[in-house]
Image (tube, helix red, strand yellow):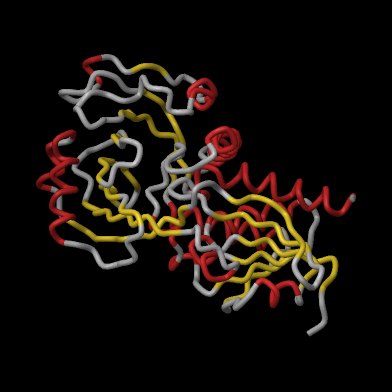
Amino acid sequence: MTIDESGVLVVGGGVIGLTSAIALAESGRRVRLISRDAVGGTTSAVAGGLCWPYRVQPYARAVRWSVRSYEVLAALAERPAETGARMVTGTMTAEVADGTAGLDADDGLTAWYEAVPALRRARPDELPEGCESGWRARTPLVDMPAHLRYLERRFAAAGGVVERRPVTSLAEAGREAGTVVNCSGLGARDLVPDPGVYPVQGQLVIVENPGVEEWFVSAAPGAAETTYVLPQPYGVVLGGTACEHAWSREPDPAVAVAIVARCARRFPALARARVLAHRVGLRPARSEVRLAAERLPGGALCVHNYGHGGAGVTVAWGCADDVVRLIAEADAA
């Protein structure tokens, strides 16, 4: 196979791979994206879609990436039917082990709180019983299946090409293009290989919407059980779990019952809502996001962009900007 020295090969077809590919294609690069799965089969398609930093490190960079993505998604929310992004008001709380609210602690997100327009402290009457503090904000909430289809259309409009096939090694990819962008998510565990990548299993339940208009999240850092209610056009997404190193993609009926019960404590009508679907996704976690460039054995440049945990859609556009920058710096060196 002849190497395309000036082309870019993006490995991975989830939200991280698609946004990276779009940013590169729209900057004038010739880009091919390779993914074994169609967008509907990626982890991104199962994501709840709330723009908020969650289970992603290092926070200093993650907040910068999140603010950039907020700006992009807020603009896309002006065309919700086309892009799948909407601006929705909601409440964020954090419960800690003793039952008190944990948002007053130094959680590393100060810059995020300062950057989100109109974010404010929740009033006592806006909080669930037993919770002492929280945030009220209007943030992007993304219908991920619709958004991923939009990203595919946008990539194609920029001249990008999608190929459905597996990639067995980065060295193989480096023999096809002068630059490789590794957005393989959990697949990086074997592809790089990087044993530091591991799954954080998330189970959710989708129910008919009984009239819920706002999102609600209560998630203590590191907790295996969370509570989130995300109204989407196709129903309400109820969650959830965050089970580290759990590989099963099969929904657990007992866990589903517990999820609905937790969410119904905030919105009682959810207890009677008809269940539409059960879903399980595996978040691609790592001690911190790997976003850095290196040379592959054959000389091709490889920019790694993986390990985003539960914040893929939240940091995607900020990370894509850094991918473009790293490649430009390598070209100029």
Q: Residue at x 69, y 44 (%)?
A: 321
Residue located 27% across and 42% down the image: 226
Q: Is residue 74 above or below residue 206?
A: above
Res 264 → quadrant: top left
Where is residue 131 drawn, in percent x and y?
A: 22, 23
Q: Residue furthest right?
A: 333
Between 224 and 45, the one nearer to me in the picture: 224
Lateral position of residue 170 relative to residue 202, left or right: right
In percent of width and height, residue 244 lies at 34, 54
Identify the image quadrant of the N terminus: bottom right
Q: Does residue 67 sit above or below 327 in this rendering?
A: above
Task: Kindly indicate the quadrant of the structure image that contains residue 6.
Answer: bottom right
- Name the foreground residue: 167 vs 33: 167
Residue found 42% across the figure and 55% down from its top: 283
Left or right of 221: which side holds 130?
Answer: left
Instruction: Find residue 258 and report its horizontal and vertical position in percent.
Output: 14, 49
Q: How many marks?
A: 0
